[in-house]
Image (cartoon, grey):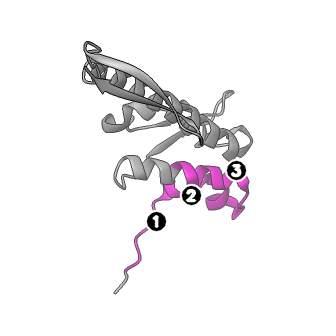
């Protein structure tokens, strides 16, 4: 039997709560909530709104320690009180793609450093000979 889960007030953007308005900017807010919940294993982001000249917002939790490599300040921009200041879904996506590419590049370079010595093969005693095959050329390695 399925049960309904209570919705946190921070799951919904202010314009949806106060004016029953839903826009693409509202979707950005909700996508950010989903991303946050995925990284924190369903912890609700507690967003504090401070309405000032910068229309800023802050979140009470720190970035999840187990996902520090994915830290992306644009995620926090998704919780701006005024929906005009939120990034687009495309900007959010491309910013995370860039973060992920950076993480993957770092991971690959670290893996390469560790595995370079594992891949070393002494070339002593190996002779390369070419055999011509009517279909294509092949290179064969033989030990002497």
> Can residue 137 be seen from the camera position used here?
yes
Residue hosting label 1: 7
Residue 53 on image: x %, y %: 69, 27
Marks 3 and 2: which is nearer the front? 3
Measured as percent of width and height from the top left, residue 28 is found at 63, 50
Total numbered circles: 3
Label 3 to label 2: alpha-carbon separation: 11 Å
Q: Is residue 24 magenta?
A: yes
What span is colored magenta in the figure?
3-32
Q: Are marks 1 and 2 in contact (CB under 8 Å)?
A: yes
Residue 93 lies, in percent from the top left, at 62, 43
Let me know if residue 141 is in the magenta part.
no
Residue 76 in the image: above or below residue 27: above
Mark 1: few/some/many CA within 10 Å (<14, 14-19, 20+): few
Distance (Cα) linking label 3 and label 1 = 19 Å
Residue 62 drawn above or below residue 83? above
**Which residue is under mark 3?**
25
For the point 57% across and 55% down, the residue is: 30
Q: Is residue 89 left or right of residue 111?
A: right
Residue located at (44% from left, 34% from top): 70
Element class at badge 3: helix
In the image, is residue 10 above or below residue 103?
below
The answer to which quarter of the image holds residue 1 is bottom left
Observer-nearest residue: 49 or 72?
72
82 vs 132, left or right, is: right
Residue depicted at x 39% and y 46%: 39
Q: Is residue 104 left or right of residue 22?
A: left
Q: Which residue is mark 2?
A: 12
In terms of sequence position, does the residue under pointer 3 or pointer 1 come before the other? 1
Q: Nearer the viewer, residue 99 or 14?
A: 99
Asked if the residue at tag 2 contacts the one at tag 3, i.e. Cβ–Cβ closer than 8 Å, the answer is: no
Q: Residue at x 41, y 52 (%)?
A: 38
């Amino acid at each position: 039997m399925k049960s309904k889960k209570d919705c946190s007030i921070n799951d919904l953007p202010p314009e949806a709560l106060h004016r029953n308005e839903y826009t693409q900017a509202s979707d950005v807010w909700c996508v950010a909530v989903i991303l946050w919940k995925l990284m924190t294993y369903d912890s609700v982001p507690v967003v504090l709104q401070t309405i000032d000249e910068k229309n800023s917002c802050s979140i009470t939790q720190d970035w999840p320690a187990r996902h520090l490599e994915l830290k992306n300040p644009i995620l926090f921009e998704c919780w701006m009180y005024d929906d005009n200041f939120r990034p687009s879904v495309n900007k959010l996506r491309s910013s995370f793609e860039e973060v992920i590419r950076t993480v993957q590049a770092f991971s690959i370079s670290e893996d390469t450093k560790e595995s370079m010595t594992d891949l070393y093969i002494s070339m002593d005693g190996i002779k390369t000979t070419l055999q011509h095959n009517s279909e294509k050329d092949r290179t064969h390695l033989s030990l002497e």
